[in-house]
Amino acid sequence: MKLISRLLISVVLFATPLAWSAPAKKLTVQQLVDQYYQQKEMKAKLFSSVSSRPPINCNPSGPSCTDVACEKLGHFGCDDMSEIQDVGRACRGNYDGTCVAAACEKLGHFGCDEITEITSVGRACVGNYDTSCLDSVCNRLGHFGCDEVSEIDQVLRSCAGN
């Protein structure tokens, strides 16, 4: 009987504050995901001095990939739903339009003026958070080393994730 009464007292003492406490703040899914990655990043910083990933809460600094692609295609480049869908699929997974703009700049004025060229460049840009790798490799290859879509494609796919 003594054991049961101690158990009952323990339950009442420990459970009562929980029952009377204010309900926990409900977090959104995004907030929970952000917390997870912040904790993960903190652990990584504690055990490693070099982080190879982009910052957690990074905001795109440039225009969207779709805006850049449509601008490169010209006035009639994104005036049809199928063209817009093609550009949208090519841009899926791009951080912003900075990579597409930089790649098209290296290809010259007529290097990204067709839908096949811009979709190829857009798909190759996936996983490139900035243009530092592209710039570095193309500078080493020289002007004629990055002046064709196939060359830019190869460089960007190699740089992705780095």
Image (cartoon, rainbow, N blue to C red):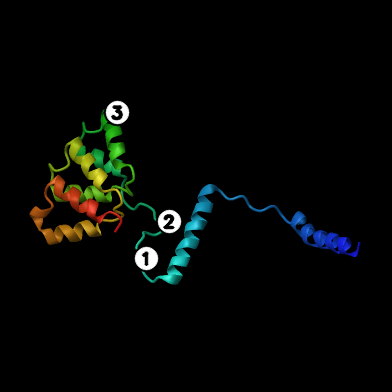
Label 2 vs label 3: CA separation?
32 Å
Q: Label 3, on which residue?
A: 81
Which residue lies most toward the right here? 1
Query: Identity of the amino acid at label 1?
Result: Ser
The vertical placement of 101 against 49, above or below, is above
Which residue is under mark 1? Answer: 51
Residue 141's x, y, as percent? Answer: 12, 58
Q: Residues within 10 Å of mark 1 (few under 14, many from 20)?
A: few
Q: Nearer the viewer, residue 22 or 77?
A: 22
Query: Residue at 63% across / 52% down in the picture?
Result: 25
Amino acid carrying label 3: it is Met
Q: CA distance from mark 1 to mark 2?
A: 14 Å
In-front residue for pair 10/147: 10
- The residue at which mark 2 appears reads as 57
Binning the other alpha carbons within 10 Å of mark 3 as few (below 14), some (14 to 19) or many (20 upward) gives few
Disc 1 is placed on an element classified as loop
